[in-house]
Image (tube, rainbow, N blue to C red):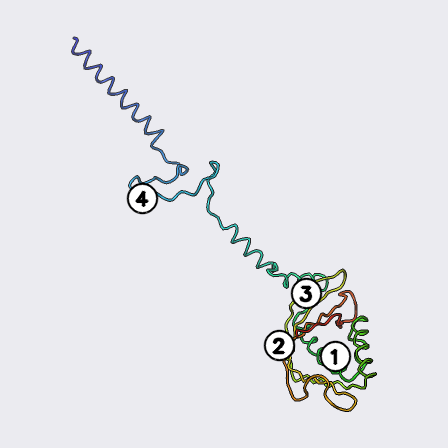
Amino acid sequence: MGEGFQFIDIILFAMIAAFLVLRLRSVLGRRDGHEGGHRNPFAPPQPVEKRDNNVVHLPDNSDEQLADDDAAAGTPETVLEAGIAEIRGADPQFDPEELLVGARVAFEMILGAFASGDRKALKPLLSSEVYSNFTRAMDGREESGEVLEETLVGIKASEIVEAYMAGSLGNVTVKFISDQIHAVHGEDGEIVEGDPNAIVEVTDFWTFSRDPKSRDPNWTLVATRSLD
């Protein structure tokens, strides 16, 4: 009789155990797609991103994306580009290459007019201050009976080296490298300065200015300087 009860107990415990196993499998053995992948315990450890203050910094391409966005938007990378962009903001039609072409023409015209003393040709091309300086030099030369021989053999190079807005005026400085013949003849024809037989390389920096709102498309020469 006792052995019968023991056999029944064994069967009962076996049934309870089977029931518990099925319940555990139904809860723990089911995958719903949100549990993530399984880690292979034999795989080499993966590098962990550096943690600062318990924050894991995940790799991203935000810096690269910002750089790409800046490039796409044309963000200026240099002071010169920033200045050109500033002038373009005031005058969307501003074209640096077009200005360079006009500056080369003006360079040749102004040098020729200054050498010949042609004030009429100079006046519309110069600011009042530069025109005043040029006329003083021409007046002094004429009073001394001197003759300037200034020949532009050719412009070897020209480039914009500075661009900026000063108030409402756009300003662009162009560097010219040119070959010139320079000589000053005295009253008796003798050479008092320079050499009419020598071609010298001259580096000039000329600054041109224009009001973007003006209907006049021409730029005016407002400053000059040369490298000795």
Vertical placement of residue 166 versus 4, above or below: below
**In terms of sequence position, does the residue under pointer 1 or pointer 3 come before the other?**
1
Q: Quadrant of the C terminus?
A: bottom right
User: In this figure, which residue is indicated by the disc labeled 1?
Assistant: 110
Q: Nearer the viewer, mark 4 or mark 2?
A: 2
- Along the viewing direction, whichever of 160 and 28 lies nearer the viewer: 160
Residue 76, how many percent across, how many down?
61, 60
Q: Residues within 10 Å of mark 1 (few under 14, many from 20)?
A: some
User: In this figure, which residue is indicated by the disc labeled 4?
Assistant: 44
Q: Residues within 10 Å of mark 3 (few under 14, many from 20)?
A: many
Q: Amino acid at mark 3?
A: Ala
Are the residues at dot 1 and dot 4 in contact (C-beta closer than 8 Å)?
no
**In terms of sequence position, does the residue under pointer 2 or pointer 1 come before the other?**
1
Residue 14, how many percent across, how many down?
24, 20
User: Could you say which quadrant of the image residue 78 lies in?
Assistant: bottom right
- Along the viewing direction, whichever of 204 and 88 lies nearer the viewer: 204
Are the residues at dot 4 and dot 3 in contact (C-beta closer than 8 Å)?
no
User: In this figure, which residue is indicated by the disc labeled 3?
Assistant: 163
In space, the residues marked 2 and 3 are separated at their CA atoms by 18 Å
Q: Secondary structure at mark 1?
A: helix
In space, the residues marked 2 and 1 are separated at their CA atoms by 17 Å
Q: Residues within 10 Å of mark 4 (few under 14, many from 20)?
A: few
Are the residues at dot 4 and dot 2 in contact (C-beta closer than 8 Å)?
no
Q: Is residue 31 left or right of residue 168?
A: left
Q: Residue at x 77, y 61 (%)?
A: 168
Residue 101, how many percent across, how many down?
67, 76
Q: Secondary structure at mark 2?
A: strand
Residue 175, how many percent across, how many down?
65, 72
Q: Residue at x 35, y 30 (%)?
A: 28
